Image: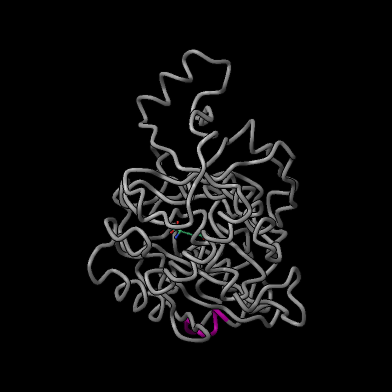
Amino acid sequence: MTLKKTNFGKIKYRGRFAPSPSGELHFGSLLAAMASYADARHFNGQWLLRIDDIDQARVVADSDQHILSTLEQCGFEWDESVSYQSQNLKHYKMALKELHQLTVTYLCSCSRKQIQAALENSHIKNGIYPGTCRHKTSQADHQQNRDHAIRLKVSADEVCFVDLIQGEYSQNLQQDIGDFIIYRKDQVFSYQLSVVIDDFQSQITHIVRGYDLLDSTPRQIYLQQLLGYPVAQYAHIPLAVTEENLKLSKLSQAKKVDCNLETLVQAARFLGQNTLDTKDFDNKSDFWQYLVTNWDINKVPRMEKQMIMV
Ligand code: GLU
């Protein structure tokens, strides 16, 4: 890859919003879009859109177009053309090859059942891969191993970073996560690997997204370090949950965002920008101008989740 350097050089601020095209844009995703947008624009940064369609089995036909038109109706304006993960496969392949060359990958044929059985006979925390296949090697030509996943060997070092909203966060990948999958058995590049490559390719400096991805961040920083990419600045906003404590998503049947001023003001309030009132604005562009000028990430609640009635 030609862009490689371990700092962002002269690039000031490039943010992004990266929805998965698995349904309509709901209030939960509007929050991530708004927070990433307002923070980028407040610092005169650029804001890019990416459709995370790496997992084609989860793609709902035309939902990318619905998401884009809802964002447009809400008044978001993005820079550059929209990118799609499905068009970035060659870069994922190259990164995988680089990781092979670093000898930090291995083939894994374990089923969930086998992993569970191995954990029952060990002192390793539940959910953590016990390292059964660690002794196996991996070949750059993974196509020959269609019934295997590829895992990344993690180190015992602590990965620490300061989240702009949640504060200091650290993980010991070996104890807390274990060797994780970067290429799935079903021949799909993992979320962890693909987003790291995408963000690097697009020279994203700031990543503002939902709290549910906070615990993925050390894995992503670890990958950035292995591949020699600059480490981005992260901020994780609280998740919007229903009265039943369910994350707003397709599972909780979250409905499509209604792009009116009330919804935008409600989202801004959720994000702690609480001096706003619908009657203060004549129209949506008035609202955006106010939000961008007065945006203060320090006011976003330092919480995992907040309840919302939508
Ligand atoms: N596509 C992911 C999602 O919709 C977000 C990826 C990210 O922000 O890193 O949850």
Up/down of 221 relative to 60, above or below: above
Find out whether residue 283 is within the magenta segment: yes
Image quadrant for the C terminus?
A: bottom left
Residue 186 as seen in the image, left or right of residue 3? left
Position in image of residue 259 (x %, y %): 38, 73
Task: Determine which quarter of the picture holds residue 176.
Answer: top right
Q: Which residues make up the magenta segment?
A: 282-288
Position in image of residue 304 (x %, y %): 58, 44
Image quadrant for the N terminus?
A: bottom right
Up/down of 6 relative to 210, above or below: below
Position in image of residue 188 (x %, y %): 37, 55
Up/down of 210 relative to 267, above or below: above
Position in image of residue 113 (x %, y %): 35, 25
Q: Nearer the viewer, residue 98 or 119?
A: 98
Report the residue at 60% width, 83% height from top. 289
The structure's colour scheme is one colour
Residue 127 as seen in the image, left or right of residue 45? left
Q: Specify the farthest residue to the left.
A: 61
Task: Determine which quarter of the picture holds residue 111.
Answer: top left
Q: Nearer the viewer, residue 110 or 238?
A: 110
